[in-house]
Amino acid sequence: MSLAACRTHCGAHGYRFAGLQVCILIQDKSLLCENISNPIDIYLLEMGKSRAEIQKAYRDRKKEKDGNAYLQKERERVKRYYVDTSALSKKKLEQRRTKIRQCMAKKRAKDKVPQNDKDEVPECSTRSNTQQQQQPPMLVKLNFPLKSRSKIQTRKRTSRAVAKANYKINKMTQKIQELKRRNWTITKRLQRRMARENKDNKNNLEKTITSPMRKANQDLREANLSPTKYPDLQKKLTYHNCLISEIKES
C-alpha cells in the first residue's frame, strides 16, 4: 500500500485494521505501514491530536509566519468583545476579577511545571522481544545560600534594641505628659492662692483703718492733701465716715 493510500485509508488522525495490515499516523510527522502476521504484535503508538492541540499548533504557525501583525489582529478582535469596567455592575466586575485571578493562578501553576515534563515522549507498549529503555528521572539540585547564624543573631539584637528604645520613648513621653499636667495643676492652684491672699490683705487693710478720723486722713493723703492744712475738710470727712459706719452697724 502506498503512502497516499495509507493516509486515505487510515485517516489523518488515528488508525484502524485493514485485514492484517495496520497503518498508524504519528503526530502528522511520519506514516508507519507494516505487514504483520499477528494482530497482537501491533505497536500502540500515540493517538491523533485533539482539537485544542490542532488550534494551538495553528496559532503557533500563524505567530511564526505573520508575527506582530497576527498579534495585533488578535488584540483588535478581542477588544471588540471587551466591555469596559466602568460599564459593568459591581457583581459583574467582581465575577470578572475572580475569573482573571483564577486564570492567573492556573498560568503560574503551569509555569512552575519543569520543561522536561512538557517534552516527554509518549511511551510505546509492545509485546515484541525488544524492551524499551527507560530514562531515569533527572534530578536538579538547587543550592540556595543559607543565611549565616551571625546575621540572624545581629538582626535579632537590632530588633530587640529597637523595641527596647521604642518602649523607653513611650514611657518618657507618658512621664512628660504627666509632669505637664501636674505643672498646670500646681500653677492654677498657686494663682488661686495668690488671689485669695491679695483679697485677704485688702480686707485686713480695710479693717485696720476702723477709726473715722484715720480713714479721713488716709483719704486726704491719697488725694495729696495734708490733714493739718485742711482741718475743715478733715472734719467733714470724719463726720461723713461716722455717719456711714453708724448706718452700716444699724
Image (tube, helix red, strand yellow):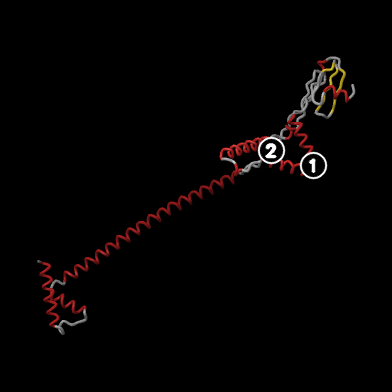
* Disc 2 from disc 1: Cα separation: 39 Å
Name which residue lies at 77% across and 27% down.
122
For numbered disc 1, what is the local secondary structure? helix
Is 178 positioned to the left or the right of 70 in the image? left
Q: Which mark is residue 142?
A: 2
On the image, the x and y values in percent for residue 187 come to 32, 61
| Mark 2 neighbour density, 10 Å: few (under 14) some (14–19) many (20 or more) | few
On the image, the x and y values in percent for residue 71 come to 74, 42
Say which of 73 and 182 sits in front: 73
Name which residue lies at 16% across and 69% down.
207
Q: Confirm or deny contact between disc 2 and disc 1 (CB under 8 A).
A: no
On the image, the x and y values in percent for residue 72 come to 74, 44
- Residue reaching furthest bottom? 229
On the image, the x and y values in percent for residue 164 come to 48, 49
Q: Hey, which quadrant is residue 185 in on the image?
A: bottom left
90 to 27, vertically: above or below:
below
